[in-house]
Amino acid sequence: MRCPHCSSLDDKVIESRSLARGDCIRRRRACISCNYRFTSYERVEEKPLLVIKKDGRREPFDRAKLSKGMLRAVEKRPIPSTKIDNILTEIEDKAAIQGKGSQEIASTVIGEMVLTELHKLDKVAYIRFASVYKDFNNLDEFINEVKKVGDLNENN
Ligand SMILES: [Zn+2]
């Protein structure tokens, strides 16, 4: 880094410290030419993951919004909130990995991730979430989905 005192580009790091639980790294540097000491900060470049909605609009990935939808689905079900929190973290990680590069992920992909997790967790919660997410057009579609879950139960 350029020395603020003599503009030399030769410096050495004399101390590195992780700040804010690793969100930021502070480095003390010493200019090799003039021995001037200065500080630099290093941060992750924040580029939010965008969710592509069905109508093509993009909005930032919103964990709180996803959490709300899932908590609604598991309401009065015997599921600890820590479990939902773990699933949310897992989905957030998976979404970040899948969206790596483009920093975009389709809302349908996230929806399927949630459905897969809820299906493993609780069939009632699954049906509740699916009924909102899949936006069933009529009662038959809904009943078919319930039947599908029923079949899967028998296979387990
Ligand atoms: Zn210098």
Image (tube, rainbow, N blue to C red):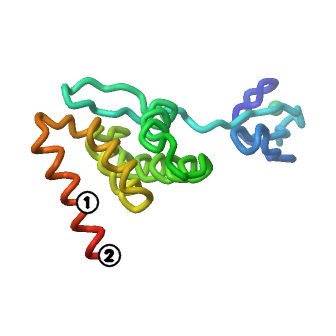
Name which residue lies at 72% across and 45% down: 22
Tell whether circle 1 marks a residue whose Cβ is less than 8 angstroms from ligand 1. no
Q: Amino acid at mark 2?
A: Asn
Horizontal side, residue 32 vs residue 72: left or right: right
Q: Quadrant of ligand 1?
A: top right
Q: Amino acid at mark 1?
A: Val
Disc 2 to disc 1, how far (Cα)? 11 Å
Name which residue lies at 33% across and 38% down: 104
Is 76 located above or below residue 146 in the figure? above
Q: Reading the chain from its start, which is encountered first: label 2 or label 1? A: 1
Name which residue lies at 82% across and 45% down: 17
Secondary structure state at the residue bearing disc 2? loop
Horizontal side, residue 35 vs residue 139: left or right: right
Rendered-image quadrant of the N terminus = top right
What residue did someone put label 1 on? Answer: 149
**Front position in the image: 101 or 14:** 101
Residue 156: assigned label: 2
Tell me residue 139's x, y (percent).
Answer: 13, 39
Q: How many marks?
A: 2
Name which residue lies at 77% across and 42% down: 11
Q: Residues within 10 Å of mark 2 (few under 14, many from 20)?
A: few
**Front position in the image: 131 or 67:** 131
Secondary structure state at the residue bearing disc 1? helix
Rendered-image quadrant of the C terminus = bottom left
Tell me residue 74's x, y (percent).
Answer: 47, 44
Q: Residues within 10 Å of mark 1 (few under 14, many from 20)?
A: some
Tell me residue 97's x, y (percent).
Answer: 42, 52
